Image (cartoon, rainbow, N blue to C red):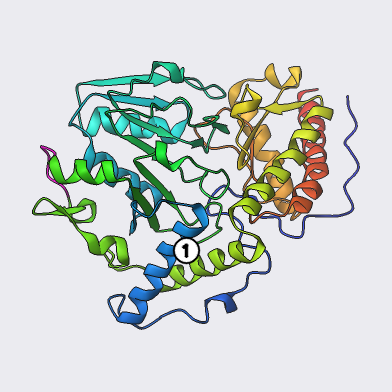
Amino acid sequence: MEKPAPKPKSKPNNPCFSSGPCAKRPGWSCDALSGAMTGRSHRAGPAKAKLKEAIEKQRKILGIPENYKIGIVPASDTGAFEMALWSLLGEREVDVLAWESFSSGWASDIKSQLSLDDVNYHTAEYGSLPDLNEVSGDNDTVFVWNGTTSGVRVPDGDWIDDGRAGLTLCDATSAVFAYDLPWEKLDVTTWSWQKVLGGEGAHGMIVLSPRAVERLESYTPPWPLPKIFRLTKKGKLIDGIFVGETINTPSMLAVEDCLDALNWVESIGGLKETIARSANSFAAIENWVSKTDWIDFLAETPATRSTTSVCLKISDPWFADQMQENQMSFIGDMCKTLDKEGAAFDIKGYRDAPPGLRIWCGATVETSDVEALLPWVEYAYATTKEQQQKQAA
C-alpha cells in the first residue's frame, strides 16, 4: 500500500480553476464595477455606448474583420448558438461534428428539436476528434472549436474549405481569446464572457460573416422563432443588435465587468498575451503529466489538446480496475479534499465525461497558481487512494 504524499506547504493564491464561470482577472475586485450604468435604461445613450464599446473592443482585440457583424444576445453562449441554429439551418444539408457533451447537445437539438432530415453526424468518443476530412464544403457545418468537457479541440481551420457553399457555425466559447481564430473560415461564431475573459454569465456574443447575413436575409426557416432568436425583421438584418441595441435587457453590471476584463486584456498586450498565458499554464500541466505515472490527458493527440479546459484521466491500472461508480466516488473525494484545503475549487470533470479532472487554464489564471496546484493534486490522489485501499482491505 502506497503512503500518501506529504501535504504541500504552499497553495495557489487563487484556487478558482472552474471551467465556467472562470477565475476573474488578476487583481479584480468589486471596485472594478464602480462605473456601471446601474439604475439607467439600457436604451439610454450612455448605456448603449457601453454596450457598443464592449462590441468594438472585442472586434479590435480579436481581429474580427470590419465587414463582420458582432452582437450581444441573451442567454450566454447557449442562447447565441441556439439563435444561430434556429435562424440559419434548414436551407441545405448539414454536417454536425460531435465529440463531447456540448457538441453532442447541438447534434441532439438539430435531430430532435429542429427535426432536420438532411444531416450527417460525424461523432467520436471523449478524447478523440471526428474525421474532419468527411466534412463537405457544400454543406452547412456545425462544430465547437474547443470541446470544453473533453479537452479536445480542432487543431486549426485548414480543414474548412475556402470556397465552401455552406456556412460554418462555430461554438467558440472556450476558444476565443485563447487561440488566434481564422475568421475567414468562420461564418457564425459564438461565445460568452464567462470563459477566457473571466466575466459574468447570461450574455452571449454572436459574430456573422457577410455570407451569414446574406443567408439570414434570403432564407426564412419553416418554423416559428421566439423574439430572442430573431435576427431579421421584414427580411432585413436588425442592425441595432450589432451596435449595442440588445434584444432584451442586459445587466449593466455584467457589461461593466466585461469592459474591465477587456481593458485588462489590452493592458497586458492583447490577444498575443492571452494566448501565451493560456499556453504557459497548459505547458506546466503538460510537463507535470510527463513526469507523473498515474495521470494522462483525456485528449489522445497532442495537436488537439485544449490549452484552456485541460481534461485529465487517471491512468493508474488500479483505478481502471474499479467500477465506474467507484471511480466517480474517488474523483469526488479527491475534489472534496482539494476544496477543503482551499487548494482548488471545481476541478471535477464534467458530469457526462469519463471520471477525471478538468483544470481551467484560460488567460485569467496565473501559471504560478497552476504550478502550486499540481502538488496538491498529487496529495489528494495519494490520500484518497490510501483511504480506499484501507476500506477494501
- Can residue 160 be seen from the camera position used here? yes
User: Looking at the rendering, in which quadrant would you find the C terminus?
Assistant: top right
State the residue in front, 285 or 272.
Answer: 272
Q: Is residue 279 left or right of residue 76?
A: right
Task: Count neighbours of disc 1 (C-alpha within 10 A) and say few if under 14, some if 14 to 19, many if 20 or more.
Answer: some
Classify residue 332 by image quadrant.
Answer: top right
Residue linked to disc 1: 57
Boundaries of the magenta span: 221-225
- Would you place residue 213 above or below residue 152 in this image? below
- Would you place residue 280 above or below residue 122 in this image? below
User: Looking at the rendering, in which quadrant would you find the N terminus?
Assistant: top right
Query: Which type of secondary structure does the marked residue at label 1 adopt?
Result: helix
Give yes or no for residue 205 being in the magenta stretch.
no
Residue name at image x 54 percent, y 64 percent:
262
Residue name at image x 88 percent, y 36 percent:
4
State the residue in front, 335 or 91.
Answer: 91
Give yes or no for residue 224 being in the magenta stretch.
yes
